[in-house]
Amino acid sequence: MSAALRRELADFLLSRRRQVDPATVGLPPGGPRRQPGLRREEVALLSGVSHTWYTWLEQGRDIRPSRRVVDALARTLRMSAAEHEYVLRLTGHGVPFPATPGPELPTHVQRLLDALVPSPAYAITASWSIVGWNRAYGRLYPGVAEVAPADRNLLWLVFTDPAVRALLGDWSADSRRFLTQFRADVGARLQDPEVVDLLARLEAASEHFRTGWASHDVDRFTSGERRFEHPQVGTLLLEHHQLTPADAPGLQLVVYTAAEGSDAAAKLVRLTA
């Protein structure tokens, strides 16, 4: 593990430890605690490791926990499935990341995006750079074509572009969701220069991002209804999907379809006419 990943693992374990109520893991009530959550020695005892070894882990020492230990820590710290998967990736036990795609979107993927009109759709890389979109997405978010390629990153736009902020139905909740899913996606790529640069720029540009990133929260993507407020057609209720092409595993295709029972289908047709 690189120093960056060891530091991320240490900070993540600390943040999860402080969120666990001792009563939920069967510990008797004790005296007042200086910090909320479990003590290090309690995590070590419940996970079957030594106090010293676990302390080293939270200090970012150069040690690599086994899969068995990671699973035990996940149980002790009451990690969600997304959090457990995140720690597995940080420690090299998770599903390997696919190779990073080249800078050019494959032509067959662009044809697929185009065929989805009037549903807005776009393609992102593992670091969330937007590398392609269809006409419907260009109408949903007209600014995408005007953004400099170096800034055409989904997370960057969510936190820095006023037009995206106005477009999202509940920016505070939506931006938080994007942030937690991005952290889950980048996982063991936190040391990559592209990711390091993006995070540094976001921390300098957005206090909201800094606060959210410091929480170390992660979550998986789930398909669901999203609300947009478009200046031309008003409220759009769209169902959000993500797909990965079998022959381009380093890409994710994001597709918005009209939510069932809404008037979004007719509005998307109007938007792309």
Image (cartoon, rainbow, N blue to C red):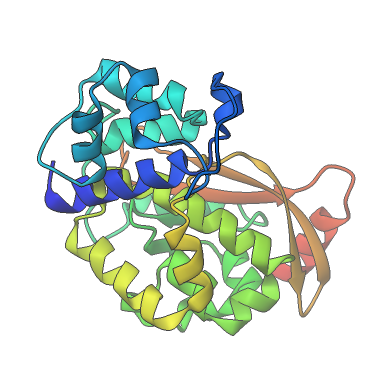
- Depth check: give the residue in front, 106 or 67: 67
Q: Quadrant of the C terminus?
A: bottom right
Q: Is residue 31 visible?
A: yes
Q: Is residue 273 visible?
A: no
- Measured as percent of width and height from the top left, residue 152 is found at 40, 73
Name the side, left or right, on which 72 lies relative to 266: left
On the image, which quarter does residue 142 sit in? bottom right
Name the side, left or right, on which 171 lies relative to 210: right
Residue at 53% over, 70% down: 158
- Measured as percent of width and height from the top left, residue 78 is found at 51, 28
The residue lying furthest to the front in this view is 31
Disc count in the image? 0
Residue at 60% over, 28% down: 29
Q: Is residue 194 above or below residue 63?
A: below
Q: Quadrant of the N terminus?
A: top left
Name the side, left or right, on which 12 lies relative to 235: left
- Measured as percent of width and height from the top left, residue 77 is found at 46, 30
On the image, which quarter does residue 153 sit in? bottom left
Q: Is residue 68 above or below residue 196?
A: above
Residue at 38% over, 45% down: 14
- Depth check: give the residue in front, 182 or 55: 55
- Measured as percent of width and height from the top left, residue 33 is found at 51, 44
- Depth check: give the residue in front, 89 or 149: 89
- Depth check: give the residue in front, 88 or 251: 88
